[in-house]
């Protein structure tokens, strides 16, 4: 049997044209998918039962016991942290937000360690963006800045930019120019018409120089900025202004490097400036397939895209204070629920040290680095393969993830609902 | 040797993301990409091991040459190895310095630890094998 | 079934021809009935003003750009935060509150039905998700077609039937309610950073003018027998001198529906500007209102501006960019492939600002000058002109010349020379307010048949009881009491249940989403049309099979099936 | 009125305490002081010893002294409009938020967001201050608008971000992006700074030490004498159509 048009639960491209061949409730093969998505669809091996650490040893327990223990841990906590969310669907995230409200928790997502700075920048200056189809159909200039689509979003160029057919583009290869900006000559740089190699940490300075040039103030710019010659910057500024539709995509190269959100802000302001001359858009290359979905859900429910503290009964937001890394670094949380992410593999050492020191529960189908830090792990259905629901693509387009395999594992949403119910029972019983 | 280290995504890292405890993931996330001239300076070749030390910790990695990177710079796939030398300070932005980490690199014969071992060092308990 | 008996209600129900009668209203289940049994819960209305539940025929509360307005504005979020209390969830936000914030605050004002002003079809799922979390009001989504390539191509070929078929497919797919055109043609031009100056200018990328699109959509709308008319945001919003464009647009509209208007023009305040630039900017509410008076086929809403901070958000991307260039504050833009655009910027309407002062006056003038209140409905284009929580103040301004004069004395002194407002003595009465806030909306939207907007047996039991005794208040002088009375109902009843009591939501609630499904003959079913499928395959970035909003998003819903002339 | 608040040691010293009610005004009005400890709300006395001596009839007569470990106590002096607060040790985040009058003196160091969105009054910090000293809130707009902040030690990153009024004097160094998006006011940095005044539109900033990694879009206006020393005078940020003034003793570019 073949199921067509399956959305891929890997990255923020959320390609929805995957064909999956099935036999007897098993995936035999996948078509149209990139290496990353392929690996996920064909992934084998998972945690079979809930597990719990008792006397320093892992033992298998029932779902009921695992949920009971989780509810107890969260109810007892004075500063509980609910973290992860990007690898699950909106329907589960909604329950997570209600849970956070109920127990006065901190809630944060993987956004905190990927595009948090993009959001901070957007909150300062806004976001001139568009859906990916606008770029596909119109863009004659595409700029990848501090991102590496070939490695991180392998189908981005073929579906949406460089190699994609477009309504107003006669020949996608010759009619679109590509500029890559990076600190190293990435794979993407090799296919670019123009490659700008910046000294690490110099993005902000280069962006300021380009802004001044677009305003016709080349005169103030020194001969070289962060390792880039002024002549090259002038050439690029001119290419930008001549484009009919320019699209900038940026990634962790500018969100994680020195200056963080100020880099993104400067990139956005460059794009806003360019809109006085021609059409330009800018978009973040979001990582997890539904990292944007959590931002959307938390925003409509609590008003902020990530890093919300419910401890005072209202929603308080202040990245740097209510963000997961800062909280763990300051050793604030006294209990932690991790879902649909793997901080064990992706957080700085000192922060996961604290996670290992407090009662931590993980909801995840697989054994991963975070497993080692937990007291309890509850395995669930794999979202997007065994469980359906809503995900938001990197450009904000919502897509319904499919369930293509039957499973006995409960979904994230079911487990979360059971935890909420159990916590309410405990509250009622005092 | 002083270097500026950045971390980021790679295809092999992404492909093994559902299998964090596999050999493949370990390999994909513990390679340190450096310019060939820097390897020469250290007197080592691709495949040799190095100890990488920052203000926040130290970890053993496997060096690999690439000309895509400038001298005195190094690159690593994101993951637990990179995080063993990443600090938790975020400049009050929420985002740690995953890029532009100042590190000292020196040759070593010590083995590259497994992901479980890295987790155990910080107080975790491995599950299964 | 649960029963409620409202005793001593002072009812104004314009649709049923009731203008201030003390009466009892019986409710059984979700409907108003002839009489209730002995078991009914009795609520003594104490002679308080009792109206059908409020209906906002043009508001922005749910969907992609609304949520982006929240997302980009932590400073607005912290300006309106409430704690979790009883069944009420936490809320954040002042001008763009969270979904619960919208729902609770609208409910406190007695509103039970909301029409989301602009839903991009590609992102419809998002709007429906937010509807679910706006639990105390029924939801309808105006669906954007201004830059819909399928429809534009059909119109280019002069094939209105095909355009109608594409509209029918899309509305059914995205569970939309009505055709919304926002700056028709302009949003498509904005795809390359351009705009359209008025209705007769050609769009750069299609062989069409806005006039062609508007006329075509009106014809298609009637071929599909949709409950509502075309819902139009005219070209050239916010530009000095745009009133000629607005009147020219109204001239295009035929009178082809005997139950309701043939065109609903929204937030007309923003389209009634005179002058050749900001220097001689002035009100042209008089010619626009006169035009409406002579055009029974047109209904407008005010789009009233009130002073203070708010957030503007519209599918009109180019207009928002122009506004950004005036304000130099933050600017977001979100173009939607093959369909439409959108933009968001925060604004602060200030009394010291002459242009803002004139805008404030124009909205009021339209409401006072248009003779028939059924043709000019009360809105702020929430949150564009002001957050909806300002409605009570607007009602009071319309009911009191004294209040208007008092306010007028505090705004920019040059306003007087640019607007007719000071000369307008009209003071609207309770009945007219009821028309402008519920009855008129129900008729204009074509939803009276669904039981909306009136209080007779058979109607949905959506009722607002305000702590106002009309015989004890002189609205002309005691406008403060009018504001207080309309700010917080004694009871808001939604579908037969008390959902809000003295400003607090008291139950979780569950709304109904209304959507249309025109019955299209097989030959016009776009699902199987090769050219339409090809458009999808080649130019959308989402597969056609993944485009329609799935049943899972509808929860409680009501499908309005229509017969068509296709 | 002299108020002495002595924080006691806690079993878990890492849980932050939110104490926005610790202001002279609240004591003058004899309010019950409630604080948040994580997700619980408790009376201040549950965490600290409270001694109140004498009466106060106006805000100017209220002096608060905070002792013990207050390094995790946030929002002390929020919306303060008069009187004094003296902190013997370190103080947690958001001390003096929205302050409009009175004086806060910190003998130790301050955590992040010291004097955020301050409108008036004085803050003197003898130790270091964290990130976002005298700054604004997320979402931009105007940061500090009035009053004065003096830090004897150094400050972290993003000091004076969005500042639009008032005076700030930093005796030590700043981190990255001091005075980013500056819109007004005067900031004096006696030590070094990096990427100072990025994207400024107005206001004045002096750097007596070295300005590292200068933003490349400032216009050189020449050398001027200030305070008996020679400074390079820059105007900008040109990228932002800015007309702010930046005076630096020394500077470097990242070339």
Image (tube, coloured by chain):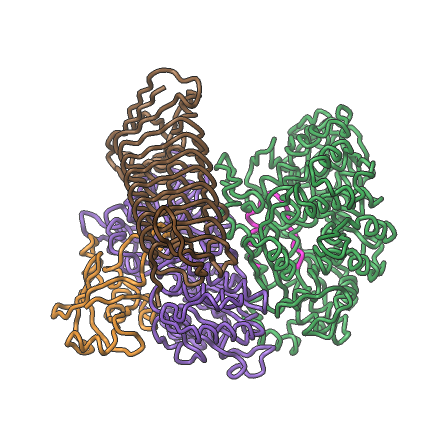
Side (left or right) of C396 relative to A107: right
Count of numbered circles on the image: 0
- Choose between C341 and C486: the one closer to the eye: C341
Confirm whether the magenta stretch covers residue C235: no
Residue D23 at what x, y percent from top left? Answer: 40, 28
* Residues rendered magenta in the picture: C125-143
The part of the image, by quadrant, that contains residue D68 is: top left
- Choose between D159 and A295: the one closer to the eye: D159
Residue C271 at what x, y percent from top left? Answer: 74, 54
* Chain displayed in purple: A
* Chain displayed in brown: D
Side (left or right) of D168 relative to A168: left
Side (left or right) of A56 relative to C443: left
- From the image, state the color of chain C: green
Please, which residue is most extreme toward the top here? D54
Residue at the image point whose x is 27% and y is 55% from the top: B87
Instruction: Using the image, determine if residue C452 lies above or below residue C261.
Output: above
* Residue A362 visible in the current orientation: yes
Residue at the image point whose x is 35% and y is 68% from the top: D255
Residue A370 at what x, y percent from top left? Answer: 28, 56
- Choose between A68 and A208: the one closer to the eye: A208
Residue at the image point whose x is 76% and y is 71% from the top: C161
- From the image, state the color of chain B: orange
**Quadrant showing the C terminus of chain B:** bottom left
- Choose between C315 and C236: the one closer to the eye: C236
Residue C164 at what x, y percent from top left? Answer: 73, 67
* Residue A131 visible in the current orientation: no
**Quadrant showing the N terminus of chain B:** bottom left
Confirm whether the magenta stretch covers residue C131: yes
């Amino acid at each position: 049997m073949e199921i067509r048009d399956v959305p891929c639960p890997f990255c923020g491209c959320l390609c929805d044209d995957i064909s999956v061949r099935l036999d007897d409730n098993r995936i035999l093969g996948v078509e149209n998918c990139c290496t990353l998505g392929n690996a996920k669809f064909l992934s084998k091996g998972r945690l079979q039962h809930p597990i719990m650490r008792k006397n320093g040893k892992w033992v298998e327990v029932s779902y009921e016991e695992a949920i009971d223990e989780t509810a107890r841990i969260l109810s007892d906590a004075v500063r509980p942290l609910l973290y992860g969310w990007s690898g699950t669907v909106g329907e589960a995230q909604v329950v997570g937000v209600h849970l956070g409200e109920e127990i006065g928790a901190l809630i944060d997502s993987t956004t905190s360690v990927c595009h948090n700075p993009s959001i901070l920048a957007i909150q300062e200056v806004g976001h001139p963006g568009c859906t990916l189809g606008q770029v596909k159909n119109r863009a004659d200039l595409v700029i990848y800045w501090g991102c590496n689509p070939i490695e991180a979003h392998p189908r981005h160029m073929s579906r949406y930019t460089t190699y994609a057919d477009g309504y107003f583009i006669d020949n996608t290869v010759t009619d679109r120019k590509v500029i890559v900006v990076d600190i190293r000559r990435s794979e993407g740089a090799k296919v670019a018409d123009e490659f700008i190699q910046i000294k690490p940490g110099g993005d902000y300075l280069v962006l300021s120089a380009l802004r001044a040039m677009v305003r016709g103030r080349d005169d103030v710019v020194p001969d070289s900025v962060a390792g880039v010659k002024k002549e090259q910057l002038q050439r690029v500024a001119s290419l930008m202004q001549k484009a009919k539709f320019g699209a900038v995509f940026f990634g962790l190269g500018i969100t994680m490097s020195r200056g963080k959100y100020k880099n993104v802000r400067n990139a956005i302001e460059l794009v806003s400036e360019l809109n006085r001359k021609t059409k330009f858009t800018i978009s973040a290359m979001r990582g997890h397939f539904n990292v944007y979905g959590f931002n959307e859900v938390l925003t409509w429910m609590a008003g902020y895209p990530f890093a919300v503290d419910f401890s005072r009964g209202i929603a308080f937001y202040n990245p740097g204070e209510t963000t997961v890394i800062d909280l763990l670094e300051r050793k604030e949380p006294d209990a932690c629920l991790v879902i649909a992410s793997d901080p064990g593999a992706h957080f700085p050492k000192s922060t996961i040290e604290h996670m290992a020191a407090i009662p931590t529960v993980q909801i995840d189908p697989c054994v991963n680095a975070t497993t080692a830090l937990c007291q309890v792990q509850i395995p669930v259905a794999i979202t997007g393969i065994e469980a359906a629901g809503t995900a938001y693509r990197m450009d904000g387009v919502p897509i319904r993830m499919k369930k293509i395999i039957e499973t006995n594992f409960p979904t994230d949403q079911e487990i979360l609902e059971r935890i909420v119910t159990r916590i309410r029972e405990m509250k009622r019983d005092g | 040797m002083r270097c500026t280290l950045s971390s980021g995504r790679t295809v092999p890292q992404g492909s093994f993301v559902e299998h964090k405890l596999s050999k493949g993931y370990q390999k994909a996330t513990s390679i340190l990409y450096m310019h060939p001239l820097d390897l020469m300076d250290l007197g080592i070749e691709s495949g040799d091991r190095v100890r990488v030390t920052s203000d926040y910790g130290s970890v053993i990695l496997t060096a690999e040459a690439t000309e895509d990177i400038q001298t005195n710079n190094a690159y690593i796939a994101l993951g637990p190895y990179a995080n063993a030398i990443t600090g938790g300070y975020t400049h009050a932005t929420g985002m740690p310095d995953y890029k532009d980490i100042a590190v000292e690199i020196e040759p070593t014969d010590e083995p590259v630890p497994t992901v479980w071992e890295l987790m155990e060092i910080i107080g975790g308990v491995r599950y299964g094998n | 079934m649960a029963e409620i008996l409202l005793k001593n209600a002072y009812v104004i129900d314009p649709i049923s021809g009731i203008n201030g009668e003390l009466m009892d209203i019986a409710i059984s289940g979700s409907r108003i009935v002839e009489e209730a049994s002995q078991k009914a819960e009795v609520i003594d209305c104490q002679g308080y003003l009792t109206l059908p539940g409020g209906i906002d025929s043009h508001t922005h509360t749910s969907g992609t750009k609304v949520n982006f307005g929240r997302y980009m504005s932590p400073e607005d979020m912290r300006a309106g935060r409430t704690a979790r209390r009883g069944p009420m969830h936490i809320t954040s936000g002042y001008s763009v509150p969270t979904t619960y914030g919208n729902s609770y605050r609208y409910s406190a004002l007695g509103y039970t039905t909301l029409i989301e002003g602009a839903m991009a079809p590609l992102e419809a799922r998002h709007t429906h998700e937010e509807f679910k979390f706006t639990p105390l009001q029924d939801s309808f989504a105006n669906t954007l077609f201004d830059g819909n390539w399928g429809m534009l191509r059909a119109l280019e070929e002069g094939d209105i039937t095909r355009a109608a078929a594409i509209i029918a497919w899309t509305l059914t797919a995205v569970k939309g309610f009505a055709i919304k055109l926002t700056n028709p043609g302009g949003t498509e031009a904005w795809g390359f950073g351009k705009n359209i100056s008025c209705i007769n200018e050609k769009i750069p990328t299609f062989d069409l003018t806005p006039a062609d699109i508007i006329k075509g959509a009106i014809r298609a709308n009637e071929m599909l027998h949709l409950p509502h008319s075309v819902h139009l945001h005219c070209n050239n919003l916010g530009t000095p001198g745009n009133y000629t464009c607005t009147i020219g647009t109204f001239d295009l509209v035929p009178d082809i529906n005997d139950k309701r208007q043939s065109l609903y023009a929204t937030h007309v305040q923003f389209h009634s500007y005179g002058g050749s630039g900001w220097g001689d900017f002035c009100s042209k509410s008089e010619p626009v209102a006169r035009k409406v008076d002579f055009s029974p086929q047109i209904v407008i809403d005010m789009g009233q501006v009130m002073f203070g901070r708010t957030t503007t958000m519209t599918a009109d991307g180019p207009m928002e960019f122009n506004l950004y260039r005036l304000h130099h504050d933050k600017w977001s833009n979100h173009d939607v492939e093959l369909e439409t655009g959108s933009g968001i910027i925060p604004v602060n309407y200030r009394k010291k600002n002459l242009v803002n002062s004139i805008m404030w006056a124009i909205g009021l003038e339209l409401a006072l000058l248009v003779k028939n209140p059924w043709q000019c409905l009360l809105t702020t284009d929430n949150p564009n002109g002001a957050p909806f929580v300002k409605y009570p103040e607007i009602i009071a301004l319309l009911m009191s010349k004294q209040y208007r004069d008092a306010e007028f004395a505090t705004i920019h002194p040059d306003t007087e020379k640019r607007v007719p407002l000071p000369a307008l003595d009209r003071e609207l009465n309770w009945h007219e307010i009821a028309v402008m806030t519920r009855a008129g909306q129900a008729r204009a939207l074509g939803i009276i048949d669904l039981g909306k907007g009136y209080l007779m047996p058979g109607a949905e039991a959506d009722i607002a009881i305000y702590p106002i005794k009309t015989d004890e208040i002189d609205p002309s002088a005691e406008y403060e009491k009018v504001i207080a009375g309309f700010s917080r109902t004694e009871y808001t009843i939604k579908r037969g249940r008390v959902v809000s009591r003295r400003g607090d939501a008291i139950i979780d609630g569950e709304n109904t989403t209304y959507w249309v499904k025109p019955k299209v003959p097989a030959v016009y079913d776009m699902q199987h049309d090769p050219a339409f499928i090809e458009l999808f395959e080649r130019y959308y970035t989402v597969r056609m099979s993944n485009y329609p909003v799935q049943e899972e998003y509808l929860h409680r819903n009501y499908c309005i099936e229509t017969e068509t002339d296709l | 009125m002299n108020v002495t608040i002595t924080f006691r040691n806690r079993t878990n010293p890492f849980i932050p305490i939110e104490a926005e009610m610790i202001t002279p005004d609240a004591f003058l009005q004899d309010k019950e002081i409630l604080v948040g400890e994580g997700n619980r709300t408790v009376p201040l006395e549950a965490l600290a010893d409270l001694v109140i001596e004498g009466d106060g009839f106006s805000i100017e007569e209220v002096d608060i002294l905070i002792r013990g470990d207050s390094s995790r106590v946030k929002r002390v002096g929020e919306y303060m409009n008069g009187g004094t607060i003296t902190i013997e040790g370190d103080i947690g985040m958001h001390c003096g938020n929205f302050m409009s009058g009175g004086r806060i003196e910190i003998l130790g160091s301050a955590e992040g967001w010291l004097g955020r969105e301050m409108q008036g009054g004085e803050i003197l910090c003898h130790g270091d201050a964290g990130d976002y000293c005298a700054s604004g809130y997320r979402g931009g707009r105007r940061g500090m608008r009035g009053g004065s902040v003096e830090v004897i030690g150094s400050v972290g990153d993003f000091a004076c971000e969005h500042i639009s009024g008032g005076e700030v004097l930093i005796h030590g160094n700043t981190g990255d992006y001091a005075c980013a998006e500056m819109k007004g006011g005067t900031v004096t940095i006696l030590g070094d700074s990096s990427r100072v005044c990025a994207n400024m539109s107005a206001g004045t900033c002096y750097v007596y030490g070295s300005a590292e990694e200068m933003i490349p879009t400032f216009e050189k206006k020449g050398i001027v004498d200030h305070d008996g020393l020679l400074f390079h005078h820059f105007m900008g940020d040109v990228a932002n159509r800015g007309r702010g003034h930046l005076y630096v003793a020394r500077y470097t570019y990242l070339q």
